Image (cartoon, rainbow, N blue to C red):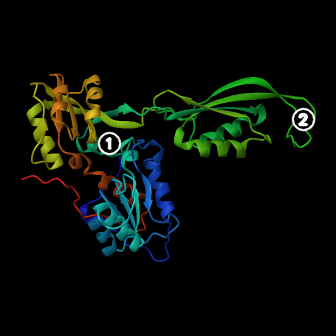
Amino acid sequence: MFNFLLKNDILRPKIENYSMKIKEVLQEIEKLAPLAYAEDFDNVGLLVGNKNAEVKGILIAHDALESVIEEAIEKKCNLIISYHPIIFKGLKSLTGKTYVERAVMKALKNDIAIYAIHTALDNSFEGMNAMICKKLNLKNRQVLMHQAKTIKKLVTYVPKKQADQVRQAIFDAGAGNIGNYDHCSFNIAGKGSFKGNENSNPTLGGKGKLHFEEEIQLNITFPKHRETAVISALKQAHPYEEVAYEIYQIENKNQHIGIGMIGERENPISEKEFLQELKNTFNLSIIRHSKLLNKEIKKIAVLGGSGSFGISAAKSAQADIFITGDLKYHDFFQAENQIVLADIGHYETEQFTKELLHSYLIEKFRNFAIVLSEENTNPIQYT
């Protein structure tokens, strides 16, 4: 997926005279995980700071706690890219009485911006759950639970002679992709009519005259986060003074947007062997799991963070094991001798997100200081 770096390659020096604004970094990271796909309950995006400020250095962290703000100050970073949002519920005061308020106050005092990506990254096909699959060497990975209402459809009408240029402009804006295919559209030939009033400036025909034109009806789908770009491209490329178009929300599933993933091992192994492999890969001291079924493990479902809501989907997908965190006592009963449920811990499932974000950004901004936080912000300890 990405070329991951060695531990001693976490910091690259800034090149003199190289400048970049915070919004440029955010535009790039949102190509990996568009904020439009974050869950409704979440609080993602730029939480603290000015998007037009110049970036001096970037710190990649799991949580933007006060200790992480101090680390950013020490390492001369004024932008923190955090997986979890430090501000989740509304703040009514800033007096320093809670760990959230103290972190925000310290960030503001030191002109440090904080950006959170959280469930936008969870729903990305190359995001947090993809990292779990990568660490487990899973193949044929697919989204476990597709997010609804992620695809829209554009219908527009273009003079036949200009149809190719308008269609291409819409494709260039990010429309027309379906799974492993791009440049997808449906085209219907027909005849359009219009009559401009005295204030019009028609490209074809004349004011006050009814005009008929051979047109192509273009039908093209696009991911919802590209709507502004698609409409802008349509209007710029279209020859008409007034562009007629329609936008529809469609119910089709985008196979690359959704939470959780399912994949397969190259070779099946026993449940006990797999659990030991899981311990080694994720550096676990303990795994809480449901009853073992004396079956081999080949098909594996994963959902980082709190994933009890994914149990039913994992069973429906006929996974042999479901790996997640924060399962409660009664959640384990849902295994019903059909699947092994493995709770490896909330932080433990998400621990590789820093590596993912750092590797992605350092490929995009090779001449800039991007630092991987050394703070372990896991609040849960094991004895």
Task: State whether residue 369 appears in this view.
Answer: no
**Residue 226 badge:** none
Residue 139 screen position, x and y as percent: 29, 35
* Alpha-carbon span between mark 1 and mark 2: 54 Å
- The image quadrant of residue 152 is top right
Q: Earlier in the sequence, mark 1 or mark 2?
A: 1
Q: Is residue 280 above or below residue 188?
A: below
For label 2, the SS is loop
Task: State whether residue 25 appears in this view.
Answer: yes
Residue visible at 75% across and 37% down in the picture: 162
User: Tag 1: residue type?
Assistant: Ala
Pointer 1 local density, CA inside 10 Å: few below 14, some 14–19, many at least 20: many
Residue 2 horizontal side relative to residue 283, left or right: right
Q: Is residue 338 above or below residue 76?
A: above
Q: Is residue 271 above or below residue 106?
A: above
Residue 312 screen position, x and y as percent: 27, 26
Residue visible at 14% across and 27% down in the picture: 296
Pointer 2 local density, CA inside 10 Å: few below 14, some 14–19, many at least 20: some
Residue occupied by mark 1: 130
Residue 244 horizontal side relative to residue 92, left or right: right
Report if the CB atoms under discs 1 and 2 are less than 8 Å apart.
Answer: no
Residue occupied by mark 2: 205
User: Tag 2: residue type?
Assistant: Gly
Nearest the viewer among 347 and 97 is 97
